[in-house]
Amino acid sequence: MFKSVLVANRGEIACRVFRTARRMGIRTIAVYSEADARAMHVREADEAVLIGPAAARESYLVAEKVLAAAKATGAEAIHPGYGFLSENAEFAEAVMAAGIVWIGAPPASIRAMGLKDAAKKLMVAAGVPVTPGYMGEDQTPAHLKAEADAIGYPVLIKAVAGGGGKGMRRVETSEAFLDALASCQREAASSFGDDRVLIEKYILSPRHIEVQVFGDSQGEVVHLYERDCSLQRRHQKVIEEAPAPGMDGPTRAAITDAAVRAAKAVNYIGAGTIEFIADASEGLHADRIWFMEMNTRLQVEHPVTESITGVDLVEWQFRAAAGEPVPLKQADIPMNGWAMEARLYAEDPSNGFLPSIGKLNHFRLPDDIRIDTGVFEGGEVSQFYDPMIAKLIVHETSREAAAARLADACADVEVWPVKTNAAFLVKCLEHPKFVEGDVDTGFIAKEEGDLTVRKISDYALQSAARVLRFGVEESGSDYFAPWSQRGGAMGFRLNATSAASQTVYVDGLLTRLEIDDNIAAERVHFEPDPVTTVYFDEGSPYRVSMNAPVGAGGGSTSDGSLRAPMPGKIVAVSAAVGDVVVKGQPIVVLEAMKMEHALVAPFDGTVSGVGAAVGDQVAADAVLATVTAD
């Protein structure tokens, strides 16, 4: 076994790998960009090396810099995590050529499965069923559109070299195809350096089911059962679970056998995932599940598999890379209980899920479940990287118990002032259809209106208002005197003598209520302001104040100006001054935090100003264009 490992990644996955390495007595080495100088993975490593500027393409994606750091620190092995260079065959070869142990799939396996079109052809030869679609070499827009028309809508455009929902669009009509194609190709080129796409028939009631496989250098391949990752938004997984609801024994045997055949077809070594799409319109059936792709790396959602099997997949990766056999035979791998994972993102569901960046002045997560995170209170969420800030994982004896416990955990999340999707996760987990297991990949899109609404409960509002009023009255000018702990949770009852009318603002909106003396104040967190509190209710923060707060926000405003919701790069400008536009028409496309964000016309009118060009780096709240109403 090697004695040191460098993790060529950042954030929660680097911290996750370090945890296992420390337990095994392996020295840990981090690499970091200038933006990550104070990051958690840097703090937790035994040694850390700066490898470049904030932008990933100048640091984490530069193989030569990572290798130089490995050589300088004497790293005996490199673990790539997921994303970045994890599925880069050339990087894997360079690591091995340098005499360093590569903790990942063989380069030949990465290549075989890295291009979705070639992988599907390989799977057909191995007897693995695949979805109908186009995987040809002709990438001209006209030909791709003709193929999509022939397949029949809706179709799914997918980047050949893609993953994680990048470079992927569902297209409903022939008329919308070319615009969606252009957006996919831009995003694919930006994320993977390859703008080629394939087209698949879109399954109308799709379930996303994947199988964890693991191989060793002796040719043994086992599976560790399936995961269901159907709860997605824009092809980005939100909640994952293991096992899959509604999966019977024969169907499980068919899908896991197919996954093992797929892995053996490419002589796979290490941890990998075979992803399938199932037509769940009539439940799960073996003859209605098709291969989509293979991820030749560890997955974000691997903790749910670890929870039901009791296996440390990172330890297995270390052992496979060191030439050891798979630790357990197939018949000896257990499957116990039910596990669920929720991805906590720094984003604002009430504002189109736009990523939220900034300092984590207050950051509290539940301490009675597994948490995988790469941030800490006082740290920052950067514009340069993925907005996922933590994973909340639970393990219970039943699916119902797991969903309830995870909902409670998400409700206990406290983050300020960065916005998160915690309340959205609670609503997803408590939705009757989810509880019944009646979900597919379109669930969030269909229910989004109900899932994103924000409303503070009467109890929470009463509690916050009482602290706000009586805290000021009782403490005089020293508002914080009775409750001086920084960010501390309140679990006390204020001794007010009578109910009284209180006028307060909740997130800037005027509210009048009668204060109930019997309401206790719980989880109220004070801002450095004698007339404001922040109350966390079901995972969502509410700013409760005596004065209406003034704040700016991104997107469109009533005067027709389109403002950048966050710092980013302009990748498309689709209108010029003088153009007549209709409400909802894209005007400018901003790329930030690895995703594209379209700024659209807020009403019918004429473009009266364009303040950005393709390639510009813009600041948050910058006016990118202006539309004047007709």
Image: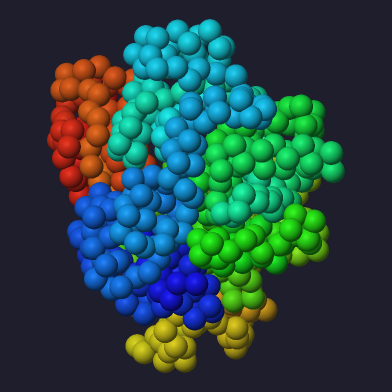
Residue 300 x, y percent position in the rendering: 53, 54
| Quadrant assignment for the C terminus | top left
Total residue callouts: 0
Q: Residue furthest bottom?
A: 481
Residue name at image x 40 percent, y 17 percent = 137
Point 62% across, 41% down: residue: 264
Q: Residue 215: x percent and y percent? A: 60, 52
Q: Quadrant of residue 190?
A: top left
- Colour setup of the view: rainbow
In the foreground, 233 or 113: 113
Q: Would you say residue 50 is visible in this rendering?
A: yes
293 with respect to 59 (left or right): right
Q: Is residue 601 above or below residue 9?
A: above
- Residue at the image point whose x is 34% and y is 23% from the top: 182
Rendering quarter of residue 141: top left
- Give the x, y percent position of residue 74: 30, 73
**Which x, y percent locates residue 189?**
31, 33
The residue lying at 43 percent from left, 76 percent from top is 3
User: Which picture quadrant has residue 351?
Assistant: top left
Q: Nearer the viewer, residue 585 or 605?
A: 585
Name, please, the residue furthest toward the right. Answer: 249
Depth check, front residue: 289 or 372: 289
Q: Is residue 346 visible?
A: no
